[in-house]
């Protein structure tokens, strides 16, 4: 029998404005299912990394397992995107691996800026000195996101000794050269829950006004360790904290932001209290990716088997327009726990990467209710339609 989904799903009269706002977001997703509109592009710059984090969903290490795009190749792909889409509407998030390992990063960022695109990097921060930050600024970048996985001991436990100090120095370097949009990203684990306020204080003191909290998916090395997984009670504690802080930030007019990351529907009781609207999954609707070997995907967190073709061989815009059928088809998502769910019209069957990488634990209502607390570590099979 399907579990009943109660937590975060109950709706009262006071929730009416939230319900209306959520339905407005749903209508936008429904329109994008019919007419996809690329506005958010990930570039997975490399799969190489100078760290080897315990939770890394991409299982990155020193060497890349694939033949990565040369400078001229990524610039040529970006040129076609500039020709075929409105580049001024496109925000590029540069991720990896560790993007700062690419010597041509500054040149490629300047190329994006020249085309009219805005960009950010997501970095482990250990290689982000004042010089690198200045070069990113000069290349036209205005947002930097640095991963801070807790206080020093917790961060170093997954990212390696000394990495917290360097990442914090990276945030300061970004501020020093003038970046205002500096975001700390924390992959929250159960061990963080007792001192979320201290973590926030640390990232604020380092200079990050924005703080994004995410949870670890069962992908790559992140699938190997059950202690990283957030169960129902953990999630409720985390969301209570985020709700409280977002309320205080508005009330006290703090120049800061705390938000939960994007993904599947969290329930009306949570959805707009822990993140702004449009927090649900837009993979393949307005979000696309260029993977480090030129494969075109929706989001770099999806299994690589969901890539839709190579931009080395076909124009990116053709792949975007002619492929991505599974991403834009809801039929297969009406299966399993979603087949009889009253929230389907709002949720559309969960966040795509969560649905594919952890099929036993993708529903956030079930997760908050604790129905997914006993997920086997091996659940991260590459299953897809
Ligand atoms: C893959 S990393 C690449 C950028 C850079 N190397 C870094 O660590 O910030 C991008 C973000 O994904 C997060 N991440 C890594 N493994 C994850 C997993 N299994 N589940 C959820 N997020 C994960 C990282 O903590 C980081 O914030
Ligand atoms: S999470 Fe980032 S820093 Fe850590 S191994 Fe993966 S790519 Fe490298
Ligand atoms: S993921 Fe599926 S079961 Fe869960 S709320 Fe969404 S539609 Fe319902």
Image (spheres, grey):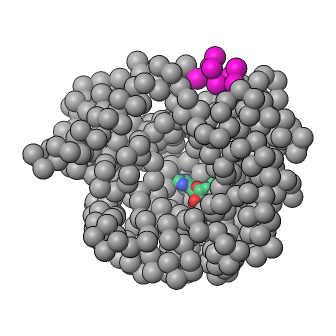
Q: Where is residue 306? Give x, y as percent.
A: 61, 30
Residue 354 shown left or right of residue 157 in the figure: left
- The quadrant in which residue 311 appears is top right
- The quadrant in which residue 208 appears is bottom right
Evaluate whether residue 81 shows in this view.
Answer: yes
Number of marks present in the image shown:
0
**Camera-side residue: 358 or 282?**
282
**Rendered view: 200 above or below 17:** below
Image point (41%, 57%), residue name: 260
**Camera-side residue: 260 or 326?**
260
**Residue interval drawn in magenta:** 316-324
Image point (55%, 19%), residue name: 325
What kind of secondary structure does the magenta stretch mostly adopt? helix
Q: Is residue 327 magenta?
A: no
Q: Where is residue 113? Give x, y as percent.
A: 74, 49
Residue 8 shown left or right of residue 313 in the figure: left
Give the quadrant of the N terminus. top left
Q: Where is residue 308? Give x, y as percent.
A: 66, 25
Residue 130 shown left or right of residue 231 in the figure: right
């Amino acid at each position: 029998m399907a579990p009943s989904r109660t937590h975060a799903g109950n709706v009262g009269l006071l929730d009416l404005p939230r319900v209306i706002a959520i339905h407005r977001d749903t209508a936008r997703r429904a329109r994008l299912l019919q007419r996809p509109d690329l506005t958010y592009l990930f570039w997975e710059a490399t799969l190489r990394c100078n760290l080897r984090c315990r939770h890394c969903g991409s299982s990155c290490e020193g060497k890349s397992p694939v033949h990565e795009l040369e400078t001229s190749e990524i610039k040529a792909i970006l040129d076609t995107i500039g020709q075929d889409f409105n580049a001024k509407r496109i925000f590029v998030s540069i991720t990896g691996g560790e993007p700062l390992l690419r010597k041509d990063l500054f040149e490629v960022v300047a190329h994006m800026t020249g085309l009219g695109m805005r960009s950010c990097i997501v970095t482990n921060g250990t290689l982000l000195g004042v010089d690198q930050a200045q070069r990113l600024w000069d290349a036209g970048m205005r947002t930097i996101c640095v991963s801070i996985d807790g206080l020093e001991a917790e961060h170093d436990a997954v990212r390696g000794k000394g990495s917290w100090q360097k990442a914090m120095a990276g945030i300061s370097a970004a501020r020093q050269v003038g970046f205002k949009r500096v975001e700390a990203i924390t992959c929250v684990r159960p061990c963080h829950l007792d001192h979320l306020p201290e973590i926030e204080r640390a990232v604020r003191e380092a200079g990050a006004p924005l703080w994004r909290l995410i949870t670890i998916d069962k992908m790559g090395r992140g699938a190997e360790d059950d202690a990283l997984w957030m169960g129902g009670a953990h999630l409720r504690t985390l969301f209570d904290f985020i709700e409280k802080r977002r309320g205080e930030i508005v009330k006290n007019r703090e120049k800061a932001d705390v938000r939960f990351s994007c993904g599947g529907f969290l329930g009306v009781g949570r959805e707009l209290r822990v993140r702004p609207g449009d927090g649900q999954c837009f993979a393949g609707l307005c979000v696309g990716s260029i993977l480090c070997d030129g494969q075109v995907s929706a989001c770099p967190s999806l299994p690589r088997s969901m890539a839709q073709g190579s931009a080395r061989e076909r124009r990116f815009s053709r792949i975007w327009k002619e492929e991505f059928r599974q991403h834009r088809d809801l039929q297969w998502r009406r299966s399993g726990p979603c087949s009889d769910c009253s929230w389907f019209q709002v949720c559309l069957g969960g966040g795509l990467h969560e649905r594919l990488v952890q099929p036993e634990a993708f529903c956030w209502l079930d997760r908050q209710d604790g129905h997914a607390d006993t997920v086997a570590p091996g659940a991260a099979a590459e299953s897809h339609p």
